[in-house]
Image: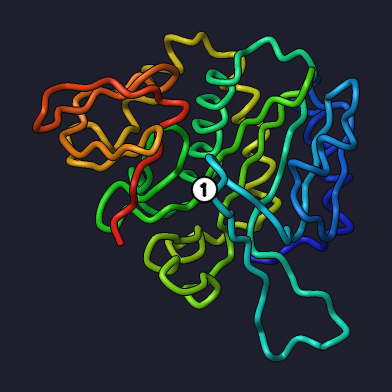
Amino acid sequence: MTEPPLESWQDAIESFLRSRQITFIQRVMVLRETGSTQEAARAAAQPSGGTLVVADHQTAGRGRLGRVWIQGTSSDPRASSRTPSRGLGVAATIALADAELSPPRLSLAAGLAAHGACAPSLPKAGTLGLRWPNDVVERHGDQRKIAGVLVENVGRLTLIGVGINVLHEEEDFPGALSKRAVSLRQLGSLESRLDVLLRLLGEFQRAMQTPPEIVSAKWSTLDILVGSRRTMIQAGRRYEGLVRSIQPTSHIEIETKEGVVQLPSLTTALVHDE
C-alpha cells in the first residue's frame, strides 16, 4: 500500500465526484493542518454550503457530546525534522446548506457511510458493526472504535464530520485509548487514506438517496448494543440495564432495576468500560 501524496488528493477527489455525479459537493478544500475540519468547513461554506473540507491532520478534533477525537501523526523516528508529520486517519467534514434530510437522518446516513467506507477494506467480512448512534466498532471482543461521526447545525449549515482511523498502530493512540480504539491497518487493511475517503463519499451519497426505512433496517442489522447490558448517562443521571431496543433517531429503551425507561437518543451518552 502506497499513500498518495497529499498534493494529489484534491484532483483525485474532484475527479471522483464528477465520475459519481455527486452534486451536493461543489467545492473541495484539502488542508495540511487545521484545528478542526468542522470549524474550517463552517468558515469556508458560508453561506451556500456544498463544501468538503479534508485535513491531513487536526489539532483540535472533537466528537459527539463534546468528546475529543484523537487523530495521530506518524512518529517514525527516521522522518526528517524538516518533514511535517504525516496524518494517520481520515478527517473530513461536508457542509450542506438547508439540507433536505434532518440532522438525525444525516447522522444515521453518515454512520452507515463510515461503516461502508471501512468494512470492504478488511480481509474478514463481518468484522465491524455500528454502536449507536454512528460509531463504527469491532463487533466482538473489546469492540474498539474505528470511526465516528459528528453532525452539527450552525444557522443554515449542517456540518457532517467523519473521522476514521486508517494507518494507526497501537502506540499512536495515547494512554488508555489504545484499548478502546483501533485502525483499519491494525485489522489487516492495506488501503490508503485516500481510498477510504473516496469510498466514504460514495457511500454517503448512496445512504442519502436510500429511503429512510431501508436505512433504519440496515442500521439495525449492524447494531451491536441491543441485548447487552450497558450504562447510559442522560441529563447527568446514569441508567444501567439491558438494552432492549434502539430507535436511533428518537430513543433507546433500557430495562433497569427500576423498570423500563426510554432515553432520548440525541442527548444520551454511552458510558464506556474502563
Residue 22 appearing in the image: no
Instruction: Tell me where residue 141 appears, x and y as whole percent.
Output: 25, 57
Quarter of the figure with residue 76: bottom right
**Residue at image coords 26%, 51%:** 140
Please give the name of the residue rendered at 58% of the width and 51% of the height, measured from the top-left corner: 164
The amino acid at mark 1 is Ala
Q: Is residue 71 above or below residue 172?
A: above
Task: Estimate the x, y position of residue 77 in percent, counting from the top left.
Answer: 68, 90
Q: Answer with left or right where residue 215 lies relative to residue 68.
A: left
Answer left or right for 189 relative to 83.
left
Residue carrying label 1? 147
Q: Depth check: 119 or 208 in front?
A: 208
Quarter the N terminus occupies:
bottom right
Callout 1: helix, strand or loop? strand
User: Few, some or many C-alpha atoms within 10 Å of disc 1 (few <14, some 14-19, many ≥20)?
Assistant: many
Q: Residue furthest front?
A: 236
Q: Residue at x 53, y 40 (%)?
A: 65
Whether 168 is drawn above or below 83: the answer is above
Q: Residue 19 or 205: which is nearer the viewer?
A: 205
